[in-house]
Amino acid sequence: MTFESIRAVFAWCSVINMGLLLWWLVFFALAHDWMYHFHCKWFKLSEERFDTIHYAGMAIFKIGIFLFNLVPYLAMRITG
């Protein structure tokens, strides 16, 4: 693979992962009650705990996107 193709892979990974994160946020905001009741069938969760788990999950996912997709892309953009 060439340097440019690897850089393009990081760029597309960033875009796709940010899209997934945005989808997760929108789905969580618009279908919160449905998601909560759906997950309560399997797990005994309070609504506060459910919100905390999703908020933490989104934060960890966002940090992962920055560390493993966006930062390598920007580093390759600067050096290339």
Image (cartoon, rainbow, N blue to C red):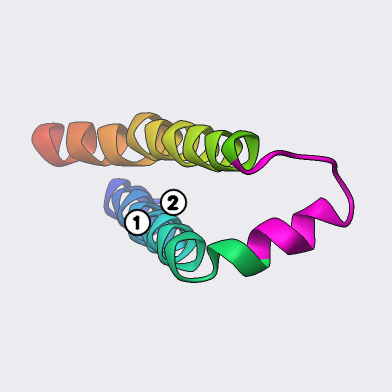
- Asked if the residue at tag 1 contacts the one at tag 2, i.e. Cβ–Cβ closer than 8 Å, the answer is yes
The magenta-colored residue range is 35-47
Closest to the observer: 9 or 25?
25
- Say which of marks 2 and 1 sits in front: 1
Q: Which mark is residue 5?
A: 1
Residue 75: which quarter of the image?
Answer: top left
Answer with left or right where residue 38 lies relative to residue 33. Answer: right
Q: Position of residue 50 (x, y in %)?
A: 63, 41
Q: Is residue 10 magenta?
A: no
Residue bearing the label numbered 2: 1
Rate crowding at label 1 as few (under 14), some (14 to 19) or many (20 or more) other CA atoms within 10 Å. Answer: few
Rate crowding at label 2 as few (under 14), some (14 to 19) or many (20 or more) other CA atoms within 10 Å. Answer: few
Residue 23: which quarter of the image?
Answer: bottom left
Residue 74: which quarter of the image?
Answer: top left
Q: Position of residue 44 (x, y in %)?
A: 84, 41
Mark 2 secondary-structure assignment: loop
Residue at image position (27%, 32%) is 71
Q: Position of residue 33 (x, y in %)?
A: 60, 64
Closest to the observer: 18 or 57?
57
Answer with left or right where residue 10 lies relative to residue 45. Answer: left
Q: Is residue 36 magenta?
A: yes
Mark 1 secondary-structure assignment: helix
Q: Amino acid at mark 2?
A: Met
Closest to the observer: 21 or 25?
25
